[in-house]
Amino acid sequence: MFNLSFLNSILLLGLLAGIIPVLIHLFVKHQPKIVYFSSLRFLKEIQKNQARIIKLRQILLLITRILIIVCLILALSRPVLKTLLSSVNWRTHATTVAVMIIDNSLSMNYLDGSGTLLDKAKEIATEITEMLNDNDKIMLLTLNNNYNSQNSYFSIPSKMKEKINKISITDNSQLVKSVLLKAEMELAHQDVINKEIYFITDDQKYSWENIQEVSPQLQTDIFVIPVSQEKGKTNLTTVSAWFVPKLLSTANRSEIISDIKNYSERKINNVIVSLILNNITREEKAISLNPFQSKQVSFEFQDKGEKFYFGAVKVKDEMLPDDNSFYFNFPSRLIGKLPKIVVISEYDIPFQFSTALDIITENKWERLTPEDINDDIITNYHLFVFYGLGEFSDKLEFFANEILQNDKSIFLIPGEEILSNNNLKFWLDNKKVKFESLITQSSKIEFINKLHPISAIFSEAMFHRTRIDKMWDIIAPDFYSLLSSGNDDSIFLISDRFLISAIDFEDSWSNLIFQTAFPVLLYHIGEFLGGEESRLYNYTTGIPFPIETKGALECQLPNGEIIPIFIGKEMETFTQTDQQGHYFLNKDDVLQTIYSFNVPREESDLTVVSERDIKSIQSLTSKVHFLEPDNWKRYILTSRYGYEFWKILLWIVLALLVTEMILAYSGKKGDKGNKEIRK
């Protein structure tokens, strides 16, 4: 199959210039000079012979000049011929530039036979480098952004084998759409005709999410080379794990609860689930799981008097170990220490609100008016709830700034009169917070921020009966949303130690206060903002975490590596979070905080792209070609015999110019002979 294309196709319009020699030939005639002789019989015979020669020469000159113009225009348009020949000598071909992407997401660590899928991917990658020669150039990328940022350069194929062998599974993988765009960008800078992208993968469906966002930008042929045809893979995973204090536990005891899921089409019996706490295995249980079933496993928690509690719930699964453990932590203050909360308000607060505060503080909270606040109050409490403030005096503004400057917390719950409070509006403006208008359209809670400790435990189902009848439209660019309505209006926003509610805790605003999730929500707000000790967090790999402790610190990574950090006056973030596990932050050899990171659990679903998915992707772009494990060599390198013919055409133009000069010179010589005869 042949494919002829032109790199500068617009120049093909110049072929119209080929008509110029024809026009000159038709309209520019050389009239012979008439000479009279006494006898014309012999001269007429000579003239007839010369006329035939002149006519033939003129036709040859016309054809030559047309070919010169046509070949020159074709050379400038740079024609390219591509053909697919399956049985060729791989070492002899036109120069090719390729980007090879190796899927190193956790699903590629699946055990298949004597090795993992990543091992097979490396074997295929090595075979591809052997099919190229050192006239070619190749770039090696993975699904890890950090790796790609350090290795985005082209090299000769013979230098690739060592790099291929060093690739390992990443806990922070990207979707393939992002890597394809990077490959396209790198190839765009290469002034070579033959360009291809090879993606060596297990065809996991999740990797292809949102490919439609970049499909119009794909200009290079992308060959998807699978490492396995197995579709019914078995995988067990620990989906989540969290600590439930006695206050919220239905069993009336503190528990650690975990969700275990079977991602396979067959039932699995006697699955061992272990609780590991502070590096000690505390308890093990055996469960059975039906196909695609999730099951909740609970472990009773017994306080051992530790300052910090961190650990993991682990399921035994040898096929894919990377998602067996879910890492978590919780502060020791949840066990016996209560949040210190004070409500600043001139009004009586709703009964449901005060009842929830009674529960989470064991009746040890206090309500004060703005005039009652003083230095002792600032010292004794940690979370200050500003509820429905009718005024915001200079005194209250001073103490509000003191609260935030001393790393304590404010929870602002507005009333309808907030826009008439000019002092409060001015104070909020300085913090880039603006209450725009009151929204009275009924809505539901449809977004939950799973990355923040306050809202991480909640699910959409816990709020499915919640209705928001009235709320403030708040513009706060430096704040993160914890809960949002279906219209993307934030119901709760937070920035560091400053939490804002868009609703009043009155039943006319929302029925949230009557829901079982409401006291749980307040409990987590109190736990996160109302305690004085170091807080512990759960994150997804790749997300930076904030560091509030000042001075010289050390961060111990999950692999044991220790990284020195220095934090000045401003809070900074730690970005090297590509590993799942626990990160220990130490100062002067004293543990300050623990951060727990887990890989996204979407990677646990090993479902591969179906025929329908492939057709859907190929309907978006014709550049993606899904190949088979046993015949991929027949289809890649379609540009193997792709040559540029402009150099050949330029040589043809040169030969035609020489021919044209010879014909023109011979014509002039003939004309000179004719003149001599005429004399």
Image (cartoon, rainbow, N blue to C red):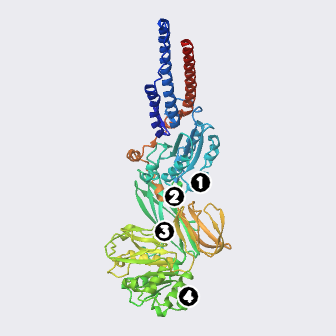
Q: Given the image, on which type of amino acid does mark 3 rest?
A: Trp
Instruction: Determine whether 432 is above or below 642 in the image.
Output: below
Q: Earlier in the sequence, mark 2 or mark 3?
A: 3
Q: Given the image, on which type of amino acid does mark 4 rest?
A: Thr
Q: Earlier in the sequence, mark 1 or mark 2?
A: 1
Would you say residue 493 is visible in this rendering?
Answer: yes
Q: Earlier in the sequence, mark 1 or mark 3?
A: 1
The image quarter in which residue 510 lies: bottom left
Question: Distance from label 1 to label 2 (Cα)?
Answer: 25 Å
Q: Which residue is mark 3?
A: 242
Callout 3: SS? strand
Question: Distance from label 2 to label 3 (Cα)?
Answer: 15 Å
Image position, residue 478 (x, y; %): 49, 72
Q: Which residue is mark 1?
A: 147
Q: Which residue is mark 2?
A: 324
Instruction: Determine whether 495 is above or below 195 in the image.
Output: below
Q: Which residue is mark 4?
A: 379
Q: Residues within 10 Å of mark 1 (few under 14, many from 20)?
A: some
Residue closest to the eye, 10 or 376: 10
Q: Given the image, on which type of amino acid does mark 2 rest?
A: Asn
Callout 1: SS? helix
Callout 4: SS? helix
Residue closest to the eye, 217 or 313: 217
Q: Earlier in the sequence, mark 1 or mark 4?
A: 1
Q: Given the image, on which type of amino acid does mark 1 rest?
A: Tyr
Instruction: Determine whether 327 is above or below 218 in the image.
Output: below
Q: Could you tell me if the residues under marks 2 and 3 are in contact, i.e. CB atoms within 8 Å?
A: no
